[in-house]
Image (cartoon, coloured by chain):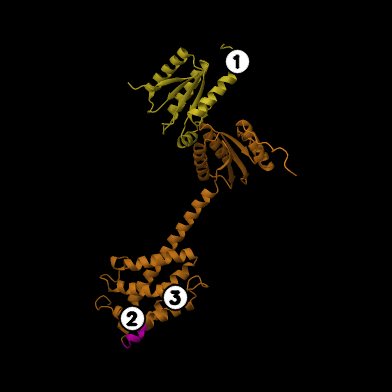
Amino acid sequence: MAASTPSRIPDLLEKHQSKLVASWLEQQLAAGSLRAGQIKEDELKEQSQKFLREFLGGLKSAHADDVMGPGWSTVRELLGEFSRSRALQGFTPSDTATFIFSLKEPLFTLLREEIKGNAQALGDEIWTATKLIDKLGLYTAEIYQQSRDDIIKRQAQELLELSTPVVELWDKILALPLIGTLDSERTQTVMENLLNHIVKSGAEIAIIDITGVPTVDTLVAQHLIKTVSAARLMGADCIISGIRPQIAQTIVHLGLQLDVVSKATMADAFALALKRTGQAVARAAARPA
Amino acid sequence: MEQIPILKIGRCLLVSIQIDMHDRLALALQDDLTQKLVETRARGVLIDISALDLVDSFIGRMLSNIAAMARVLDAQTVVVGMRPQVAITLVELGLTLTGIQTALDVDRGLALINRLIDAEGEDGAGGAH
C-alpha cells in the first residue's frame, strides 16, 4: 500500500509546481472562482501558489496523512484565513470548496502522465491525494460555516443594540422609542440600557414610545410593566406614549392594567414630562417676518 | 456589634446601609430609627442603598416595614441610590416596593422629601405647627 513505499507526490509536485499552478488556475477560472471580479486573478494566483507551497510542506512532514496533525498547521491556517475572507466577501460554500477540489483534476493528470504503465502505483497515489484533498476541502467548508455563524451572531447582537436606543430629549427627560416585538431577551436589554442611562444622565422621567411595537399582548404588557417598575425603583417615572387606536382597544379587550400614565403621542408625553420637571419651552417672541 | 449610623440633615434622617443586613441588624435599625424619629421629630427618612449590590426579599420587606413605621410617626420615606442590576433583580422577583418613594441619589431624594413634606404641610392644615 501507499504507506510501505514513500509517495512520489512531493517530488512530482516540486518538479512541476509552476505547471500545476497554471493548470489549476485555469481549472478555477473555468469554474467561475472569480465571482464576477470580487477577487482579482493575481490574487487568486498568489493564493494558489502559496497554498501549493504549504501543501508540499505538509506532504513532506512526518505524518503526511494526518491533516489535523502539527505538520499541516500552516496549511490549515492558510485555508482558515482563506475561507474566512471568502465568507466575508459573500462567496457561496461551493465556490469556496471548489478552490481545493479543483486541484484534483490537474494533480491527477500530472500523476497519470508521470506514473505511466504502473496501474497499482497510480491507483495508490491517486487514492492518497484524494484522501488529503477531501479532508482539506471539508476543513475549508467547516471554517466557512464557522465564519458565517460568527457573522450572523454579530449581526444579531448589533440588531439587538440598534433596536434599543435611549435618547436624551431634554434635561432630566429620556425617550425610549421601542421598535419591533418585545420578547424577554429584548426587554432585558431595553431595561438595562434604560436604567444605565437613568444613572448616567440623572433623568427623572422616561418616555417609552411604543409606536413601533406592532402588537401588544399580555406578555408585551407584562414586559412593559417590568420596565416601568424597574425605572420607578431607580427613582424615575415613566410615561408610555404612541398608543395606536387598535392597541388601545386590544389593551381594554385583554383587560390589561398598565398602571402608568399613557399618552397618545410622544408630543403629549413630552409636554407632560416638561410640566412635571418644572420646565417649559416657550415660543420666541415675534420672529422677524 | 456593628451599627448603622443615622444622621440628621435638616428635617430628615439619613440612613446609609453599607453592609450586608441580617435579622438582628435590621431589628436594631428599626429600633434606632423609630427612637431617633421621635427624639428629633424628623419629618423624613432617606435610606441610601447605593452600596448594596444584592437586595433580596428580606431587605425589601425591611424597607417596607421602615416606611410603614415612619408613616405612623408622620415621616416620609424615600429609598435612594438603587443600582440598575438591583432594580432589575427586584422586578424579576416581583418585588416592586409599592408604597415606597424612590429617587436616583441622595440629592434628588432630599429634594423629593422636602417637596413631599411641604405638600403635606399644605394639606394637613398646619397640624404640626
Instruction: State the image quarter where residue A277 is shown.
Output: top right
Q: According to the colouring, which chain is orange?
A: A
Query: Do the CB atoms of the residues marked 3 and 2 lie less than 8 Å apart?
Result: no
State which chain disc 3 sits on. Answer: A
* Number of other residues with Cα within 10 Å of mark 2, as a class: few under 14, some 14 to 19, many 20 or more: some
Q: Secondary structure at mark 3?
A: helix
User: Is A132 in front, or is A153?
Assistant: A153
Q: Earlier in the sequence, mark 3 or mark 2?
A: 3
Circle 2 sits on which residue? A123
Q: Looking at the figure, which quarter contains the N terminus of chain B?
A: top left
State which chain disc 2 sits on. Answer: A
Tell me the kind of residue under disc 3. Answer: Asp
Circle 3 sits on which residue? A42
Disc 1 to disc 3, C-alpha distance: 88 Å
Q: Is residue A158 magenta?
A: no
Q: Position of residue A171 (x, y in %)?
A: 57, 37
> Are the residues under marks 1 and 3 on the same chain?
no
Disc 3 to disc 2, C-alpha distance: 34 Å
Residue at x 61%, y 42% (from the top left corner): A209
The part of the chain drawn in magenta is A110-117
